[in-house]
Image (cartoon, rainbow, N blue to C red):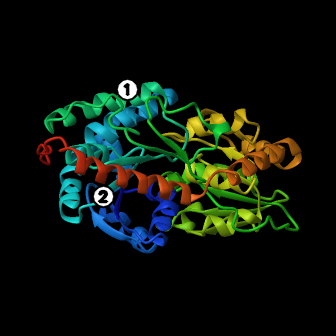
Amino acid sequence: MRILFTCRAYVGHLLPMVPLAQALVAAGHDVACSSGPGIRAEVESRGLTFLPAGPDQMTPQQRATLFPEISSLKEQETRAFFFGRVFTAYELPLRAPDLAGVVDSWKPDVLVHEVAEFAGPLVASSKGIPYATHAFGPVPADEVIAAAAAGARPHWEAAGLQPHPRAGLWRHLYLDICPTSMQRGAPAGAPAVRQVRPAERTAARRPRSKPMVYVTLGTVYNTEVGVFRTILEGLEDQPVEVLVTVGAKGDPAALGPRSANVRVERFLPQAEVLPECAAVVTHGGAGTTLGALAFGCPLLLVPQGADQFVNAERVAALGAGLRLLPRDLSASAVRESVGRLLREPSFAAAARRLSDEIAAMPGAGAAVTAIEHLAAERRTNRRGQKGPPQRPLLERP
């Protein structure tokens, strides 16, 4: 069986799908990943075939030029804007023709797309291929899905397809990596939902002479040097060890001289870092948030955009961390919040409860079985009836 994964050209959108992709390879299936060329190395370093399709990751400057209105959006408007304007109206037509060519040449039996990648559902529907939607956090809110459907509608119509009410999301299968207690609710209209553990506790927590605080802004917002500096000003000369990662392409020198308790690195695998941590300070990207919780680490969340405000709200509501919205971020607020996470045992206790919940979720093997069932259903349908006629996809503008 051949399975094609497709994602936006962002490492944070790729990584949540890697455990399933590797489990499918281990089960003897052929697996490839299709995305923008900028993440080829990330895909191939994990033993997967890379097939280029679509645009690369936007730089902050490109994003500001293409979408200047982002800077004036309210926090609650941000995610709907990205789903309706960036992910569908803008990116979908740039990726769909390339992806259609990949599907025609590589001939996958099943496609797996991440929840912010919308060319996958369109191409798969046009070609009569079953597909799964892979989550990377809580289910998007109704208004976010409505914005995506509106942005995708003209491209479905141009392909000769009836527009899907959710822009194709979870039409056949939803793979949910979000623990139930963090979830916003069930995905409306999904015919099948399978939970998949988002991260593994690969090592036991290791005690240290001083508590270690890990600081990361992920793989997109790690260009926010001012946010890093504010966080570090709050943690310098405190009775903690601070580990900061600025990204593989980041420059540690950009943070300026730091006190002796601060160590700055470009990249370290989180599975090696998190067992050492007493607390994590992060923007609230789903990968870091769920990874920290898998190890029972309480969080201070400083959301900057996208789904981070939702993730921060859910973690704070569950008592597993605190959040500082952009208007509240200051060195003193960081110092006070991290101090609370380390002093008050309720935060660590809540994080451990979520850690146990994540550990109890099914592993990637359950999702492998679900993908295999999708392929089997397709073979059965092919023998029993003809599929819908294929229509040409919208040409690249």
Q: Residues within 10 Å of mark 1 (few under 14, many from 20)?
A: some
- Residue 127 falls left or right of residue 242: left
- Residue 232 falls left or right of residue 206: left
- Earlier in the chain: of badge 2 and badge 1, it is 2
Q: Position of residue 338 (x, y in %)?
A: 78, 47
Q: Vertically, is 293 above or below 160?
A: below
- Please report the residue visible at 32 percent of the width from the left and 48 percent of the height from the top: 130
Of the two numbered discs 2 and 1 in the rendering, the one whose residue sits closer to the viewer: 2
Question: What is the CA distance from the residue labelled 2 to the residue labelled 1?
Answer: 29 Å
**Residue 112 visible somewhere in the drawing:** no
Q: Looking at the image, which is closer to me, 121 or 289?
A: 121
Q: Looking at the image, which is closer to me, 101 or 192?
A: 192
Residue 109, numbered label: 2
User: What's under tag 2, amino acid-wise?
Assistant: Asp
Figure quadrant of residue 72: top left
Q: Position of residue 24 (x, y in %)?
A: 46, 65
Residue 146, numbered label: 1
- Name the element at disc 1: helix
Q: Looking at the image, which is closer to me, 15 or 165?
A: 165
- Residue 68 falls left or right of residue 297: left
- Please report the residue visible at 53 percent of the width from the left and 41 percent of the height from the top: 304
- Please report the residue visible at 45 percent of the width from the left and 28 percent of the height from the top: 77
User: What's under tag 1, amino acid-wise?
Assistant: Ala
Figure quadrant of residue 253: bottom right
Q: Quadrant of the N terminus?
A: bottom left
Q: Position of residue 9 (x, y in %)?
A: 36, 57
Q: Looking at the image, which is closer to me, 235 or 113?
A: 113
- Name the element at disc 2: loop
